[in-house]
Image (cartoon, rainbow, N blue to C red):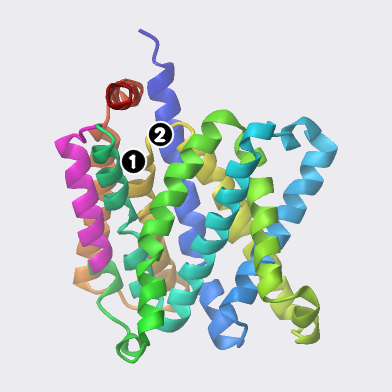
């Protein structure tokens, strides 16, 4: 039997981890932009999406114009996915600004658990290794972020509701994106969803209001950096990896993001690493290894889901 599927899954894992690396290593910069520079979280979201969409559109127009085409039957689906992208990014950055980075990360990475529950509801029984991977990833993330930020204690009910929405939104985003990248190239899905999500946020904060804010050139360079290395590059890697992996496995591997964020803060900002965080990092790594072993035949699993759905209809 050909080793091509196994090789493709190995590439997929590497790509998802690379996405997590970029997300984690740029987290401190994103935090400094809207907390230290006083830029609203929704402005950062809008600009990173706009910059990423503009650069990707320019590349596709000159190199791969055919990749811009989507079938009429998928247009509504792309619009829905774009709104999900806008909601995922907006809720996550809002949670960071109101609840703190650690709690926002923890809330978002409940998502792999929800993905497994959704697949179970659809008739796909997860392997023990997959279940263990999800639980270890959740526990490891909790150890990594070290509890609740003091500001979260005084957060409003609305703040907590937005924070709690991070997990189901991210889970839905991964599942919906999995379907999209099975039909289209990752760059096709990205350019449409980024562009439409940017328009959604432009309705919240009009571009002329951002220009009128008078941000210095140094801050605009940070916006550009986030648009490329916190958005365009990692999401392209994540989609290319998701195309090759089951959704649950991709979600678990993505929990490497807080590991990278904390190690980056240790290396570049001099922040200390506590024993609990080291233990959490170890749990996340073990979870990624288990996730890689948990679904040895994803195609067979998807066929089982299809059979279960056909028996219901």
Q: Position of residue 21 (x, y in %)?
A: 47, 55
Say whether residue 17 is visible: no
Which residue is at the far left? 128
Q: Main secondary structure of the magenta part?
A: helix
Say whether residue 136 is visible: yes
Circle 1 crowding by C-alpha within 10 Å: few under 14, some 14–19, many from 20? many
The span from disc 1 to disc 2 (Cα, nearest Å) is: 7 Å
Q: Position of residue 154 (x, y in %)?
A: 33, 92
Q: Which residue is mark 1?
A: 249
Q: Residue at x 35, y 69 (%)?
A: 164
User: Is 313 part of what is drawn in magenta?
Assistant: no
Q: Which mark is residue 288?
A: none
Q: Residue at x 59, y 79 (%)?
A: 33
Q: Which residues are magenta?
A: 124-142
- Residue 101, quarter of picture: bottom left
Which residue is at the far bottom? 154
- Residue 96, quarter of picture: bottom left
Q: Are marks 1 and 2 in contact (CB under 8 Å)?
A: yes
Residue 239 is left or right of residue 301, and the answer is right
Q: Which residue is mark 2?
A: 245
């Amino acid at each position: 039997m050909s080793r091509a599927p196994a090789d493709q899954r190995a590439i997929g894992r590497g790509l998802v981890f690379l996405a997590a690396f970029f997300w984690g290593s740029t987290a401190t910069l994103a935090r400094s932009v809207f907390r230290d520079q006083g830029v609203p979280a929704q402005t950062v979201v809008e600009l990173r999406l706009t910059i990423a969409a503009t650069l990707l559109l320019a590349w596709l127009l000159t190199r791969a114009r055919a990749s811009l085409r989507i079938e009429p039957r998928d247009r509504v689906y792309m619009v829905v996915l774009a709104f999900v992208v806008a909601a995922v990014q907006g809720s996550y950055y809002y949670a960071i600004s109101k609840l703190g980075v650690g709690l926002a990360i923890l809330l978002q990475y409940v998502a792999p658990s929800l993905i497994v529950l959704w697949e179970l509801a659809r008739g796909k029984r997860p392997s023990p290794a997959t279940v263990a991977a999800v639980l270890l990833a959740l526990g490891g993330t909790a150890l990594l972020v070290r509890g609740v930020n003091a500001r979260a204690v005084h957060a409003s009910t609305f703040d907590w509701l937005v924070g709690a929405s991070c997990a189901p939104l991210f889970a839905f985003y991964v599942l919906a994106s999995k379907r999209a990248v099975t039909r289209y190239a990752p760059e096709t899905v990205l350019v449409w969803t980024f562009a439409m999500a940017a328009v959604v946020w432009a309705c919240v904060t009009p571009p002329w209001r951002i220009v009128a804010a008078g941000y210095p050139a140094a801050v605009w360079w940070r916006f550009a950096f986030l648009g490329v290395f916190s958005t365009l590059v990692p999401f392209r890697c994540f989609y290319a990896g998701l195309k090759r992996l089951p959704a649950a496995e991709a979600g678990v591997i993505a929990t490497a993001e807080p590991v990278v964020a904390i190690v980056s803060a240790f290396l570049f900002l001099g922040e200390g690493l506590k024993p609990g965080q080291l233990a959490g990092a170890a749990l996340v790594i073990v979870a990624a290894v288990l996730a890689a072993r948990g679904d040895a035949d994803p195609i067979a699993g998807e066929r089982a889901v299809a059979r279960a759905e056909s028996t219901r209809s």
